[in-house]
Image: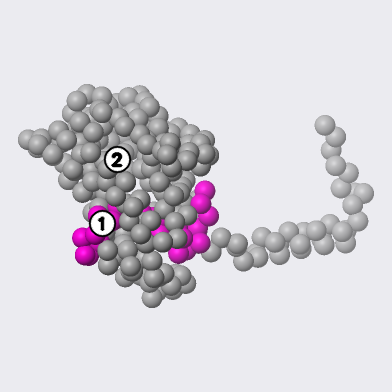
Amino acid sequence: MTTPDFQSIAPEAFWRDAEKSTRDACAPPDFPWLPFLLQTSDALFPTGAYAHSLGFEEIVRLGVVRDEATLGHFLHQHLLPALTHLELPYLRYACETTTLSELLTLDHEISAWKPARETREASAQLGGRRLKALLALKEIGPISPIGPILTDYAAAIANQKTLGHHLIVCALQARIEDIPLTAALTVYGYQSLAACCGAALKLIRIGQDACQRVLRNASSALPAAVTASQEIQRPDAGSFNPMLEIASMRHEYAGERLFIS
């Protein structure tokens, strides 16, 4: 490997290149959607996600997850496959949908893929709270105007024509804010993994460092999951894990609980 001969570079060329690099670094970013996406994916955003484990509490009670190793195994073998084959494909379908009727059809299909009542209701609660927060913020700052499809969707929920799953609301937010599809899918997947790790901190003997190791390892598999999910056509989408569904059903009747679902 040879060392560059800086003496051979003309001073004016060096400073010209440095000035160009500085201008490029200070140029307005081409991702104006990112700050609000970060805000709405943060734990501070009032969706109430901290109160739900989506059946994970019963998974711990059954002894499936006990420590760092088994938590990592659960994310890789159970949560990531469900994201790849069901949640992320349906998020993509909802992002690509242009009519309210098709959006409601997707919402009903998501309900059908959630046999456990607790899981369905938790998804609807998260969706309703995200929707309420988005509507409350529509007049503030540089946030894009709320599209008619979002208000129509809110009206359909109010009229009990649909449940209003969290996944659908996330898709509508991505469309309104012009969030690139890959970014929307990745953030949704990360939130799912992080929520499980957050619940683990309350349920098993695991420290924050161990949780971060597990989350980092699982997140490294997200790009491949996002890519694979974009190849799944609607007739082929779906995931059924009896253990997860039974755990959600058992949790509803547990004698004591730390989480709503």
> Which mark is drawn over residue 72?
none
Residue lying furthest bottom: 139
Q: Is residue 255 left or right of residue 176?
A: left
Compared to residue 189, the image places residue 97 above or below, namely below
Rendered residue at 82%/31% (across/down): 1
- Mark 2 Cα shell of 10 Å, populated few (<14), some (14-19), many (≥20): some
Say few, some or many: other residues with alpha carbon within 10 Å of mark 1 (under 14 / 14 to 19 / 20 or more).
Answer: many
Along the viewing direction, whichever of 120 and 191 lies nearer the viewer: 120
Kindly indicate the quadrant of the structure image that contains residue 80. top left
Residue 162 badge: 1
Query: How far separated are the C-alphas under marks 1 and 2?
Result: 15 Å
Specify the amino acid type for callout 1. Answer: Thr
State the residue at coordinates (25%, 28%): 243
Residue stretch rendered in magenta on the structure: 157-182
Q: Is residue 13 visible?
A: yes
Residue 46 horizontal/vertical position (percent) = 29, 59
Instruction: In this rendered view, identify the residue nearer to me: 51 or 55.
Output: 55
Residue 207 pos. (x, y %): 31, 34
**Label total for image:** 2
Magenta segment: does it hold 179? Answer: yes
Q: Residue at x 47, y 46 (%)?
A: 186
Sequence-first disc among 1 and 2:
2
Where does the C terminus fall, quadrant-wise? top left
Which residue corresponds to the image point at 25% horizontal and 55% vertical from the top-left? 163
- Residue 113, numbered label: 2
Q: Quadrant of residue 246?
A: top left
Asked which secondary structure carries label 1, the reply is loop
